[in-house]
Image (cartoon, grey):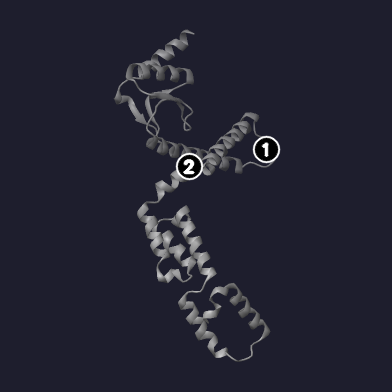
Amino acid sequence: MARYRQTFTEAMQQVALTEKEVSKLKNGVKVLGNALPNRAMAQKACDKATREMGKECDVYQSPFNNRFYVRLKESADHEISMARGELEAISDKALKLSSILQGKTDDAQLEAWVQSKITKAKDYINSVSDYMEYNPDNANEEVILEFTDAQIKQAYGILNDPRYKQGNYSGAVKVIDKIAPGLSKQPDVANALKRANEELEESFSDAQIKQLQKEYEPLRGKKISIDNANKLGAMFTKFDSNKNAL
């Protein structure tokens, strides 16, 4: 017990509760003071920081050295960058573990606690990933963050461009995505693309009608094969509202 108190006292002395002791780990997590050997000591240091400095904090275990830190809570903007840093650290460790296991045979045995930790880590990551991917609120936030009103208006302008309005659907998608990657999948833009494509299928444009007149005029009054007749008939059926204009 005496040894524990001495260690804790030394640790408390290391946590000088001033702004000078605030630092960042390599994954962007902002911490107060140095690493501590266990969670209980880190929690006591966190409580002290809250009392003496008015700091909001919690206990953080680093994925790099498994030591405990007093983590200072930050705004939502910083939390995003911090989460990304932690995911990069997890990815780095996972790749190293995969490399280690790759050198083992299928007959090799893993200790039970190792397999348990790997399974839990997988479950935790899957849970967060599914939540972020399928939660509607997160999806809407992503659209707002990635695409501005100006970019969406540019996409609408492309859909009204004569070069794409006549049916060059894939070309329109490519140009829209050059404005911002994935812009063609933004809900409003995607709906506009869908409407444009449906309208194209429902009716011929004047330019298309003239083109058909030009191409099929030489066939007027002539016999054509059954296959070509069937194809032509199917086309006219599809565009029934316009066939009288031909």
Where's residue 210, x and y in %? Answer: 48, 81
Closer to viewer: mark 2 or mark 1? 2
* Left or right of residue 136: residue 102: right
Q: Which residue is mark 2?
A: 138
Q: Nearer the viewer, residue 29 or 173?
A: 173
Secondary structure, mark 2, is helix
Q: Nearer the viewer, residue 210 or 35?
A: 210
Amino acid found under the numbered disc labelled 1? Ala
Q: Earlier in the sequence, mark 2 or mark 1?
A: 1
Q: Which residue is mark 1?
A: 108
Where's residue 225, x and y in %? Answer: 66, 86
Residue positioned 48% across, 39% down in the render: 87
Q: Give the CA separation, mark 2 to mark 1.
A: 42 Å
- The numbered mark at residue 133 is none
Residue positioned 53% across, 88% down in the render: 217
Secondary structure, mark 1, is loop
